[in-house]
Image (cartoon, rainbow, N blue to C red):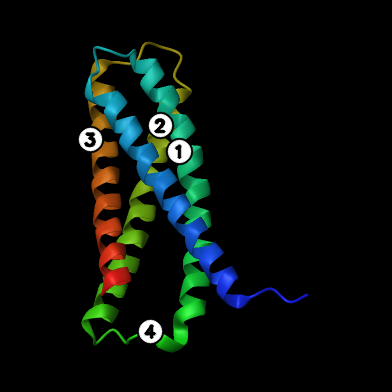
């Protein structure tokens, strides 16, 4: 029995959207936890951030694989970068690459904090809040570009 290619493409798109929702929602969750540093212990914020980092990188891998699958599925119908749609796609892909590159220092900082045996200062939570605010903002831009591409 042969698998319907349309069904496969829909499944790949759904997995792509689910991975994006997981990564974006996780960043929003860590940010929400870090916004009120007095209400949650700094160690708890770092613990949640560390768990998110594992989820982020897994989701990034799924997004890369399914994104390539989506590009392959639609490659015959894709507009070139000289068109508004193609330029937006290039901008989205560049934004995704920047998000991944700039996420590595965030992950390393969280990993280093998680190995700390001493008390974690409130200022550290402020820095984490800023890192996750930037991550959330980057995801919001990428999501906006993706929505524009889907409806453009």
Q: Residue at x 27, y 38 (%)?
A: 131
The numbered mark, 2 or 1, whose residue comes first in the sequence reads 1
Q: Nearer the viewer, mark 4 or mark 2?
A: 4
Contact check, label 2 and label 1, Cβ < 8 Å:
yes
Per the image, the residue denoted by label 1 is 53
Q: CA distance from mark 3 to mark 1?
A: 15 Å
- The disc placed on residue 110 is 2
**Residue under the point 39% across and 24% down:** 46
Q: Sequence order check: which comes first, mark 4 or mark 2?
A: 4
Q: Residue at x 55, y 63 (%)?
A: 11
Q: Which quarter of the rendered picture does the C terminus lie within?
A: bottom left
Residue at mark 3: 130
Earlier in the chain: of badge 3 and badge 4, it is 4
Q: From mark 4 to mark 1, how far is it between C-alphas?
A: 33 Å
The numbered disc on residue 78 is: 4
Label 3 secondary element = helix
């Amino acid at each position: 029995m042969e698998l319907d290619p349309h069904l496969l493409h829909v499944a790949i798109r759904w997995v792509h959207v689910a991975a994006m929702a997981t990564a974006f929602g996780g960043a929003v969750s860590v940010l929400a936890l870090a916004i009120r540093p007095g209400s949650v212990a700094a160690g708890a914020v770092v613990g949640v951030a560390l768990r998110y980092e594992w989820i982020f990188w897994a989701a990034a891998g799924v997004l890369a694989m399914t994104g390539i699958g989506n590009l392959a599925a639609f490659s015959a119908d894709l507009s070139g970068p000289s068109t508004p749609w193609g330029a937006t796609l290039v901008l989205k892909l560049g934004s995704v690459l920047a998000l991944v590159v700039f996420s590595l220092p965030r992950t390393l900082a969280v990993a280093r904090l998680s190995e700390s045996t001493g008390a974690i200062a409130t200022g550290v939570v402020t820095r984490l809040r800023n890192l996750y605010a930037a991550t959330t903002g980057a995801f919001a831009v990428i999501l906006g570009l993706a929505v524009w591409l889907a409806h453009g």
